[in-house]
Image (cartoon, coloured by chain):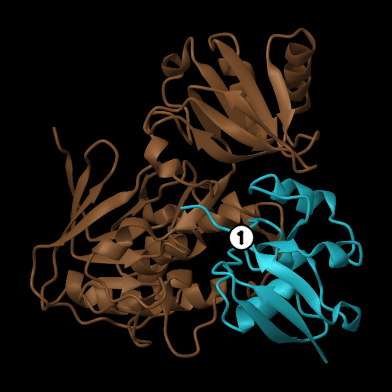
Chain colours: A brown, B cyan
């Protein structure tokens, strides 16, 4: 069964710019749903640098990435946006006209579809996806011998498993899969792990008791007739190589950002960015807007504050699509009792 | 003033004028070579991974623990560095490096 959600606007990306757009749209009585591929809101601020101080947010001499996200969530709370996390927008289909745009948006998970009058793409550098190591022909083994995530542990029962990496994912899956794997090998580039100490200890004791193997080095090639994986060639720091026999390899190299399906929505692209005008931040498709790091225009600066400004201006044009018959009155939150009512702060 | 020599992923060597105080990642990006630098130099993404020629490796400040942690997320060689963590100074005139491959 496909669920269809009708809303005014779908925002793609729950980073700071997408979150603030909820606020600007909300002041104009525009309802939105926000979709993000990550399991949490905040985008790069929360995923890449939650603890890093940011010094160029107006009004905040210093705020951390996560602190900014938390504040934005508090700021948009009065508008009750609905979040769809862990979902990626797969397709966007135009079912309206240039004067009265209407879109059908479909996501990867749960077969959710949305019908909306405007789309705000606030996807930053694209969608976060597992980093794929640059190993020749690795794609040919993906889904059979190479996995970037564990969805069902039982898939790895009685298999020879090679885990690559030294972070929490690599170490957690090492200790979780070791009991069911036929043989588990952990490969990392150095003898230091940035994972929870007790997990590292557990791994070391499994190595000590001979119940798993730990090697230092890097995978340089895969063995076996694709899609069947039989082993991996490993290069040590001294340049020598050896082979580890395995049925599956799980590389855990963290996340990176890829443009992904956005490239297939009929939008003009320039070097993986979406060109927009600087009045409305609308793309070549009427009704689809791009704000924040993902857009480009003469003089563009990839700053969070630029994305906030872009969202505010885009909201003005979105209002015309959502309420074509209504005249938009420009108001300030300091003085407008109607805006204050929407924010829940009216006297 | 000075230069750095950067070999791209197709094997072509480029000589780029360097600017004191800039991150090597920023110099490479400013000249338009394909280096992602996703996080903007915050040592948070490892998309500016380079291989430094052996002769130059010892002339660089050694990687911090933070840089080592990020290097864990790419396929390294013993001469791997993140170019956002190398600040160019005149002592690095002639620095020789190669852009590391990126995954699919």
Q: Chain of mark 1?
A: B
x then y, percent, for residue A80: 37, 50
x then y, percent, for residue A184: 61, 17
The answer to whether residue A161 is above or below residue B97 is: above
The answer to whether residue A323 is above or below residue B30 is: above
Q: Residue at 63% of width from left, 72% of height from top?
A: A57
The answer to whether residue A46 is above or below residue A222 is: below
Q: Which residue is mark 1?
A: B47
Q: Name the foreground residue: B96 vs A223.
A: A223
Q: Quadrant of residue A302?
A: bottom right
Q: Quadrant of residue A285?
A: bottom left
Q: Is residue A30 visible?
A: no
Q: Residue at 46% of width from left, 74% of height from top?
A: A333
Q: Quadrant of the N terminus of chain A?
A: top left
x then y, percent, for residue B25: 69, 72
Asked if residue A141 lies left or right of residue A199, the reply is left
Q: Name the foreground residue: A245 vs A177.
A: A245
Callout count: 1
Q: Name the foreground residue: A237 vs B102.
A: A237
Q: Residues within 10 Å of mark 1 (few under 14, many from 20)?
A: many
Asked if residue A120 lies left or right of residue A296, the reply is left
Q: Name the foreground residue: A168 vs A330.
A: A168
Q: Residue at 22% of width from left, 54% of height from top?
A: A91
Mark 1 lies on a secondary structure that is loop
Q: Is residue A40 visible?
A: yes
x then y, percent, for residue A174: 62, 22
């Amino acid at each position: 069964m496909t669920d269809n959600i009708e809303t005014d606007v779908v925002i793609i990306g729950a980073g700071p710019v997408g979150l603030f757009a909820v606020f600007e749209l909300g002041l104009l009585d525009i309802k939105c749903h926000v979709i993000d591929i990550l399991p949490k809101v905040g985008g790069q601020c929360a995923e890449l640098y939650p603890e890093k101080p940011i010094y160029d947010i107006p009004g905040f001499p210093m705020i951390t990435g996560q602190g900014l996200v938390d504040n934005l969530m508090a700021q948009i709370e009065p508008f009750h946006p609905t979040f769809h996390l862990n979902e990626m927008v797969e397709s966007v289909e135009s079912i309206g006209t240039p004067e009265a745009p209407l879109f059908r948006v479909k996501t990867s998970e749960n077969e959710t579809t949305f019908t909306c009058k405007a789309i705000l793409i606030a996807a930053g550098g694209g969608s976060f996806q597992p980093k794929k190591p640059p190993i020749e022909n690795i794609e040919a083994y993906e889904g059979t011998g190479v996995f970037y995530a564990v969805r069902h542990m039982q898939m790895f029962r009685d298999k020879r498993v090679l885990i690559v990496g030294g972070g929490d994912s690599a170490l957690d899956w090492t200790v979780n899969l070791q009991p069911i794997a036929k043989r588990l090998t952990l490969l990392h580039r150095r003898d230091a792990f940035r994972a929870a100490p007790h997990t590292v200890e557990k791994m070391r004791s499994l190595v000590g008791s001979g119940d798993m193997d730990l090697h230092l080095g890097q995978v340089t090639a895969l063995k076996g007739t694709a899609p069947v994986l039989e082993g991996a060639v490993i290069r040590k720091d001294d340049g020598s190589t050896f082979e580890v026999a395995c049925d599956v390899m799980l590389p855990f190299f963290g996340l990176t950002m890829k443009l992904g399906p956005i490239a297939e929505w009929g939008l003009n692209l320039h070097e993986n960015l979406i060109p927009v005008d600087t009045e409305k931040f609308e793309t070549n498709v009427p009704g689809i807007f791009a704000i924040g790091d993902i857009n480009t225009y003469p003089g563009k600066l990839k700053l969070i504050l630029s994305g906030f400004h872009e969202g505010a201006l885009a909201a003005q044009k979105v209002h015309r699509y959502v309420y074509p018959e209504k005249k938009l009155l420009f108001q300030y939150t300091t003085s407008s009792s109607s805006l204050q009512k929407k924010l829940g702060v009216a006297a | 003033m000075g230069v750095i020599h950067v070999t791209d992923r197709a094997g072509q060597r480029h000589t780029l004028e360097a600017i004191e105080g800039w991150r090597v990642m920023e110099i490479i990006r400013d000249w338009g070579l394909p280096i992602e630098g996703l996080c903007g130099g915050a040592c948070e993404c490892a998309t500016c991974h380079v291989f430094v020629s052996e002769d130059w490796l010892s002339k660089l400040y050694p990687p911090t623990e933070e840089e080592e942690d990020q290097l864990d997320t790419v396929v390294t060689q013993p001469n791997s560095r993140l170019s956002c963590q190398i600040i160019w100074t005149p002592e690095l005139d002639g620095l020789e490096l190669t852009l590391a491959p990126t995954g699919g």
